[in-house]
Every structure is written in structure tokens, then in C-alpha cells.
Image (tube, rainbow, N blue to C red):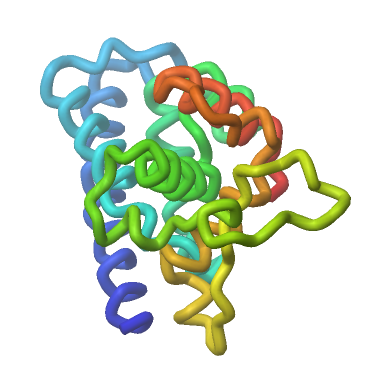
Amino acid sequence: MFIALSYAWSGIVRVHSVHLMNVVRRQLAANSQTKPVDLGRKSACRLTFISCCLDYFNSLLFGISDGLLRRLQSVQNAAARLVTGARRCDHITPVLRQLHWLPVRQLVLFKIAGLVYQSLAGAAPAYLADDCCLLSDVGLRPLRSNSNDTRKLLVPQTHNKLGDRSFSAAGRRLWNDLPPGLRRPGLTVDSFRKSLKTHLFGDQSA
């Protein structure tokens, strides 16, 4: 299963690279490769397609190899440089911040944390919501050092890497690692997403 998934995402990298090269050729022909680009409708659609595909089902990317993750990140970096006119030697982090694009690794965490939030808020399908059990709901208490934190999730024991990558395990661990302010009850979805994005932008070494 993991091999098939890696093969599928490798194909996505190849497809997106072709789309980017088509956009670059158009911009070279217009002699605007060193300036912020006026993309035009076709080029803008290609970049939108790339961004959507990187976001589509990216929660499945949790735990993939660093090599494949770097390849996906290179696609996002190339798209960001094209949109902003940044040079290849320019550091990519400020460029992504300018576009409000989370790096691929943080984008995956953003998606999973969002699914957990929706599950706890009753806005997710039952098959996801059933995988998110608060300690308080099962009659357990958090550790004494976190005795005031009632929004921790019960993390199941896993026995292999596939189990570690499952939503029922990975999602709960990720949720428990979030700052308490992001897990507090009553936080609206917009406030959660905005605060989570700010948190992940500040945690890009994760």
C-alpha cells in the first residue's frame, strides 16, 4: 500500500513539473521571468491546479519518506517563485509567507488537525468522529502536570508504522501536541484555522 501511494505521488510530482515548465516557457517568451508575473488566465489556472492537488488528500502524506516530501516541496517552491518572481537563490520561507502558503509538511499537519477539530465539533463524518475520544469522555484524567487540560485525546497503542500513520493514532497525537489555546472548547472554526496556521508557520522546523 505504501509503495503504491509513493508511486502515485511521484506521478503527481511529474505532472506538476510539466505544468510548471509550461508556465515558465510562457513567461520566458514574455521576457518577465525576473519580475512578479502577470500570469494570464491559462497560467493562473495551471498554478491553481497545482495548489489544489497538493492540498487534495494530503492528509495521506503523513509519515511518508523525507525524499518524497522534498520532491513535493520542490514543486510548491517552484510555483511560489514563479508567482512572486523570486530568484532561485532567494530563501523560500519568506516567499511562502508572502503568499500565505504553508510548506507541504505543515500543510499535512494543518489538514489532519482540522479534521480532528471538525470531529470534536460534530462536523465530521461518524467514521472520523468515532476515532476522536476525549480523555474526559472515557472516564480518564490527564497527567497531573496537565490536570487542567481536559481536551486531550486518548491515543491508541499501535504496533507498526502503518498504525502510527492512521488517523486514529496520528490525529490524536497531533491534537495533543497542539498548544492548549488551540484545543480550548468554543473556538470557532475560523479562529482555529487562523491560529493553527500561525502556529505552524512558527514551527517549520517540525
Residue 50 occupies quadrant: top left
Which residue is found at the position 49% from the left and 18% from the top?
191
Q: Nearer the viewer, residue 41 or 102?
A: 102
In the image, residue 200 above or below residue 158: above
Whether residue 62 appears in this view of the structure is yes
Q: Nearer the viewer, residue 134 or 8?
A: 134
Q: Nearer the viewer, residue 40 or 105?
A: 105
Which residue is found at the position 48% from the left and 39% from the top?
77
Left or right: 76, with 17 as reference point: right
In the image, residue 65 above or below residue 113: below
Q: Position of residue 38 (x, y in %)?
A: 28, 11
Which residue is found at the position 54% from the left and 44% from the top?
106
Q: Residue furthest bottom?
A: 159
Whether residue 84 appears in this view of the structure is no
Which residue is found at the position 62% from the left and 23% from the top?
94
Left or right: 11, with 111 as reference point: left
Left or right: 60, with 38 as reference point: right
Left or right: 181, with 114 as reference point: right
For the image shown, how many numbered marks are present on the structure?
0
Q: Quadrant of the N terminus?
A: bottom left
Q: Position of residue 69 (x, y in %)?
A: 49, 59
Q: Nearer the viewer, residue 119 or 7?
A: 119
